[in-house]
Amino acid sequence: VVDEAHLIALWGQDFRPHWGRIGEVQSLVPSRVPITLASATAPDPILTVMKKSVHITDSNHLFVNIGNFRPNLVWEARVMRERASLSERLAFMVPENPSPANFFPNECALVYVNTRTDACEVLDAIRKRLPAELRPMVQVFHALRGTLTKAWILYYMFLKLLRILICTEAAGMGCDFSGVHLVVHYLAPKSLISWVQRAGRGGRDGKRCLCLLLVEPGIVKE
């Protein structure tokens, strides 16, 4: 079974070449052993690459599409003001006179970014709007953080002791957070698939989750 199989197409050529070699596994098992590719985001071009990689033909496979529509996810794209500072652009995430009682009480928010630099800048912008005692409730998660630090962050997320987690792709696949009712993507993602995957980390408890895409004015077509 290959989970997140869309990565065969997205990563297999350059970022993680071993994904492009998944099909070689078939030479190590008997021919009667079936292979399953699972993904929540596999549009036709991606699906074609996935099947080709593991030598699936139109005559020897079963295709099951149960859909990925989740009615509790509310999608919105918001154009940021051109000359606003980063702190001003993210001001909606911090209430006036923030306190533990009104700053995402009993829940948390995910803010996805494309780069580690963006992650650190967003972290600073949000923390500047918070009193000192609330700043540790906002953390950043990316690949260069230490193993123990990442484990600590995920544990605190599980306990709902963090209010906002700013993260790159490192906090994507394999992470199952509860109590996430706001997922923000700062700046346009590299692909629509990436955004759908990241937004899917919200609303795992069945409650309403706002999936908010923040983009620069120049990227929007009138």
Image: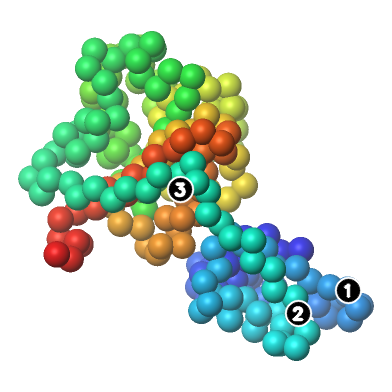
What x and y, as percent, mark residue 61? 75, 79
- Which class describes the residues within 10 Å of circle 3: few (<14), some (14-19), or many (20+)? many
Residue at 56% in and 36% down: 206
**Mark before the other along the chain sequence, 1 or 3:** 1
The kind of secondary structure element at disc 3 is helix
Mark drawn on residue 33: 1
- What amino acid type should be assigned to the residue bearing mark 2? His
Residue type at numbered disc 1:
Val
Spatial CA distance of label 2 from label 1 is: 13 Å
Q: Which mark sits nearer the N-terminus, 2 or 1?
A: 1
Which quadrant: the N terminus?
Answer: bottom right
Q: Amino acid at mark 3?
A: Ala
x, y percent for residue 19: 62, 70
Question: Dot 2, how many residues are within 10 Å of its Cα: few (below 14), some (14-19), or many (20+)?
Answer: few
Mark found first going from the N terminus, 2 or 3: 2
Residue at label 3?
A: 199
- Dot 2: what SS? loop
Q: Is residue 211 visible?
A: yes
| Number of residues whose C-alpha sits closer than 10 Å to that of mark 1, classed few (under 14), some (14–19) or many (20 or more) | few
Name the foreground residue: 77 vs 131: 77
> Which residue corresponds to the image point at 28% horizontal and 25% vertical from the top-left?
94
The residue nearer to you, when weighing 99 against 123, is 99
Quadrant of the drawing holding the C terminus: bottom left
Report the label total.
3
Determine which of the numbered discs, if any, sits on residue 54 in the image. Answer: none
Q: Nearer the viewer, residue 131 or 4?
A: 4
Rendered location of residue 189, percent (x, y): 36, 58
CA distance for labels 1 and 3: 34 Å
Residue 217 placement: quadrant: bottom left
Circle 2 residue = 61
In the picture, measured across the screen, residue 62 lies left or right of residue 27, that is: left
